[in-house]
Amino acid sequence: MTAAIMAENILQALLTGLLVGTIYGLLCVGLGLIFSVMRVINFAQGEFMMIGMYAALFCFQTLGFGSGLGVWLGLVASAIAAGVMLYAVGAILHPALLARVTGTRVAGSEGDGHYPQLTLTLGLSLLLANGGLVLFGSSPHTIQTDLSSSAWTVGPLLGDDILLFLNKVRVLTFGVTLLVVSCVAFFITRTRTGKILRAAADNALAAIYMGIDVTRAHRLAFALGAAVTGIAGGLLAASYPFQPYVGVEFVVIMYAGVVLGGMGSIRGAFWGGLTIGLVQQMSSLVLPMQLQGAAIFAVFLAVMLCRPQGLFGRNTDRA
């Protein structure tokens, strides 16, 4: 292999890893929002992504977003609509199920309610996945557009030796993802409601004494985390084939990214997901696809050994 080909492969893997890693980061932000505020390990987060994928497919094809708005805007609108649907799902599920095993209701109980939380979210995951199988069948789907199979060419670079390719739908996903992450970061750090969420995350009891409705804050965080994951799923549906059990393939990546970035740090969750995307794509240069997961967790373990709190986590950071 010549130096030019090697350089081309490395640069292409870096670009692809950046594009893929941003959508992983958005998935991790959705999970990180729920964990940061509620301290709940939500096993159903992958199924929220799956619902977002089917919701975006429904909006794009059945509701005619693709034909009415055009491919570019139609994909974005479908993903946003999926996020709105998942926000409603989260807002309904929290008072119906999660509120019964979280917050002040379980304060002081054994494990602070973590055992029923794990059982509940695992059961919800199985219910949603199997319900999806009944409703949608097991055949894989995707939002098929010309953008998914076309790319922009960058180069030639260094004379005529290096050509790089940017998949159009992944570039669109990259741009929308950065916009959504920026909006979430602004909401959490700059708005009054965001400060309420951070107060409820830091010390729920003190927040109650200050007049904050912690249950309402938890409901908002759960719904917002579901919405962000729904948007990510809607964007991913244009480049990744999906079926009702697709959540299992991504939930491990979500948790690895959240822990890698730092438990309780939303900024860290995004960078953790981005890191996983880069490692996954760079490892493809030297490893078969079956071993890419091993490369991810090798880096994960190395970071945990050197920095157990994660890349951006601190003992005092809760949101």
Image: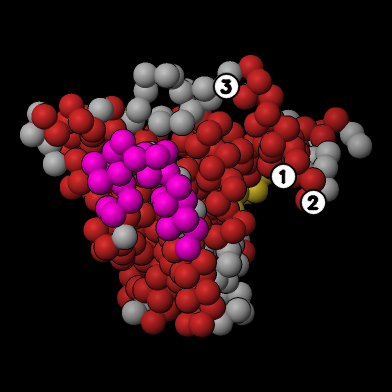
The residue that label 2 is drawn on is 290
> Viewer-proximal residue, 159 or 298?
298
Mark 1: which amino acid? Gly
The residue that label 1 is drawn on is 293
In the rendered view, would you say 122 is above or below 288?
A: below
Side of 264 relative to 253 (left or right): left
The residue that label 3 is drawn on is 308
In front of the other: label 3 or label 2? Answer: 3
> Viewer-proximal residue, 35 or 285?
35
In front of the other: label 3 or label 1? Answer: 3
Region of the chain picked out in magenta, as a range: 99-123
Where does the image place residue 275, in percent across and percent down from the top left?
A: 59, 34
Side of 162 relative to 314 (left or right): right
Mark 2: which amino acid? Gln
Side of 182 relative to 271 (left or right): left
Q: Quadrant of the N terminus?
A: top right
At x 61%, y 75%, the residue is: 140
The residues tagged by marks 2 and 1 sit, at their Cα atoms, a distance apart of 7 Å
**Tag on residue 42?**
none
